[in-house]
Image (cartoon, rainbow, N blue to C red):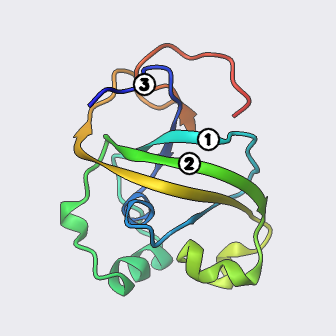
Amino acid sequence: MELDKNRIALGIKQPWAELILRGKKTIEVRSRSTNVRGTIYLYTSKKTATETYAVKAIQDHELDNCKFPLGLIVGSVEIAECRLTTPQDTVKSCLSPLELENRYAWIMKNPIRFSKPQPVRFLPYGIWFYPFCRRKESSA
């Protein structure tokens, strides 16, 4: 597998990365908007989300959280759009309407799971980071 060394990555906790790769979660909910569009890498944080709604998502989707890859690039996804969330985003975000209030919906398409998760050369320094090269100026 040939990696794009200049591609930006999004740091995200499990189970959210797993649900994105399965195509169950097509909306990533964040407190800020983003201008990033196009294909990005998905980097799984070293810790699994422990919030009640994350535990509920694990149960609802019958995931085995002991098998989640952590601290690795697990795949890629395309960010197609960013807009304010609506109550209708509950299914596509795997969240309740309460968690959607005053948030942004990052619309994700075309997830690709890597057959072998990849270690990063540079550790995350925020939500966005360059896992294989030094930081560049970006509009993230």
The residue carrying mark 3 is 4
First along the sequence among labels 2 and 3:
3
The residue carrying pointer 1 sits among few (fewer than 14), some (14 to 19) or many (20 or more) residues within 10 Å by Cα, namely few
Against 123, is 98 above or below? below
Task: Determine which residue is flagged by label 1.
Answer: 38
- Residue 78: which disc? 2
- Dot 1 or dot 3: first in sequence order is 3
Callout 2: 10 Å neighbours few (<14), some, many (20+)? Answer: some
Q: For the residue labelled by badge 2, is the local secondary structure a helix, a strand or a loop?
A: strand
- Residue 121's x, y, as percent? 34, 21
Residue 120 is labelled as: none
Q: Say which quarter of the image contains residue 105.
A: bottom right
x then y, percent, for residue 26: 55, 66
The amino acid beneath tag 1 is Gly
In the image, what residue type sits under mark 2?
Glu
The alpha-carbon separation of the residues under discs 2 and 3 comes to 14 Å
Residue at the location (39% across, 59% down)?
21
